[in-house]
Image (tube, rainbow, N blue to C red):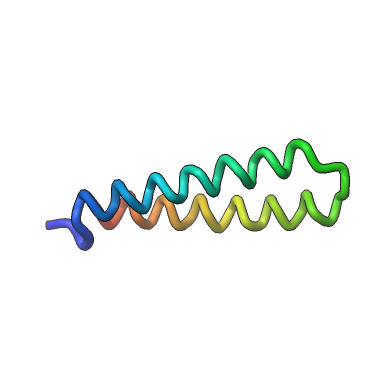
Amino acid sequence: MPDISPKLAHDLANVLAAAIASARLISRKVEDDEVKELADIVLRQLDKAATAIHDASE
């Protein structure tokens, strides 16, 4: 039995997908190395959250 409902997992995954896409775009487009590094940190954490949501919904 999943820890969270499939609908909730789907809704959270959609929000995270938008945030992940934004962080990737920032990381690729920005020239400031400090901002790029921070965007990469955010991206890693968002990826962890997405994985946790996926795992909890199975």
Q: Is residue 24 placed above or below 52 in the rendered structure?
A: above
Measured from the top left, where is residue 23 in percent x and y?
63, 47
Residue closest to the eye, 45 or 17: 17
Q: Is residue 20 left or right of residue 52?
A: right
Report the quarter where the N terminus lies. Answer: bottom left
The extreme left residue here reads 1
Q: Residue at x 39, y 45 (%)?
A: 14
Q: Residue at x 43, y 50 (%)?
A: 15
Q: Is residue 13 left or right of residue 23?
A: left
Q: Residue at x 74, y 37 (%)?
A: 28
Say how many tags the image has: 0
Q: Is residue 3 placed above or below 55 in the rendered structure?
A: below
Q: Is residue 3 left or right of residue 30?
A: left
Measured from the top left, where is residue 10 in percent x and y?
29, 46
Residue 20, located in which quarter of the rendered image?
top right
Q: Is residue 6 left or right of residue 35?
A: left
Residue 49, located in which quarter of the rendered image?
bottom left
Q: Residue at x 42, y 51 (%)?
A: 50
Measured from the top left, where is residue 12 in percent x and y?
36, 53
The extreme bottom residue here reads 3
